[in-house]
Image (cartoon, helix red, strand yellow):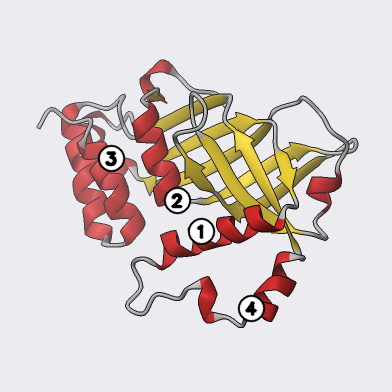
Amino acid sequence: MYTPKSHEETRVDVMHELVRAHPLATWTVLGDGELLTNHLPFGLDPSRGEFGTLVGHVDHSNPVWQAPPTDVLSVVAFQGPQSYITPSWYPSKHEHGKAVPTWNYAVVHACGVPTFIENRDWLYAHINSLTNEHESGQALPWAVADAPPDFTERLLTMIVGVEIPIQRLTGKWKTSQNRLESDKLGVVAGLMSKGNTQSKAMASLVRRHTAQ
């Protein structure tokens, strides 16, 4: 990923925060002569490895886990807040007109070699952990134990676990860092005026890079 120094994020805790907040990732693996791309939610275990370990599962019929073994790092991309930025929000644009549109975004790339797991106990613990994490904010949290045991056991035979120890972790925060302070404040105001969740989240990231 092309990452200018001004957009580079190196703090592991900040990158982990984005991964947890946006767990649905785009995962690309080198298969048998082609790139295999899947979209799936990953859990993050920060206690294992220098940069943590990603944990997830795929359908048993998914060819990704049957591809020939390779030492080539796979890439797991986590997309955070993103938004179109109009130059109309820049006060400097109204002074001299020298401005163009751009797109702001925050993204994390986690790279590592996956291992695949068919162990029933591992899979059962994994789906419980994944479920508990994402159900915790629900008014009536669902639990794996709510389903009939024979139903759950049958579903466990239909998935394969995946672990990716992160060997390289790269963050890119393109959040108007290269603009004048007045332009950054204009971007924040413009994003807030749109009122949607993505725009508000990006406004918060831009605000972190303002003097105020």
Label at residue 130: 1
Sequence order check, earlier mark of 1 and 3: 1
**Three-letter amino acid code at the position of disc 1:** Leu
Q: Which residue is mark 4?
A: 149
Of callouts 1 and 2, the N-terminal one = 2
The C terminus lies in which quarter of the figure? top left
Q: CA distance from mark 1 to mark 2?
A: 14 Å
Residue at the location (76% across, 65% down)? 158
Amino acid at pointer 4: Pro
Asked whether residue 154 appears in the rendered view, the answer is yes
Pointer 3: what residue?
Answer: 205
In the shown orientation, is residue 206 left or right of residue 198?
left
Q: Label 2 sits on what residue type? A: His
Towards the viewer: 15 or 167: 167
Q: What residue is shown at x 33% (from left), y 35% (from top)?
A: 175
Amino acid carrying mark 3 in the image = Leu
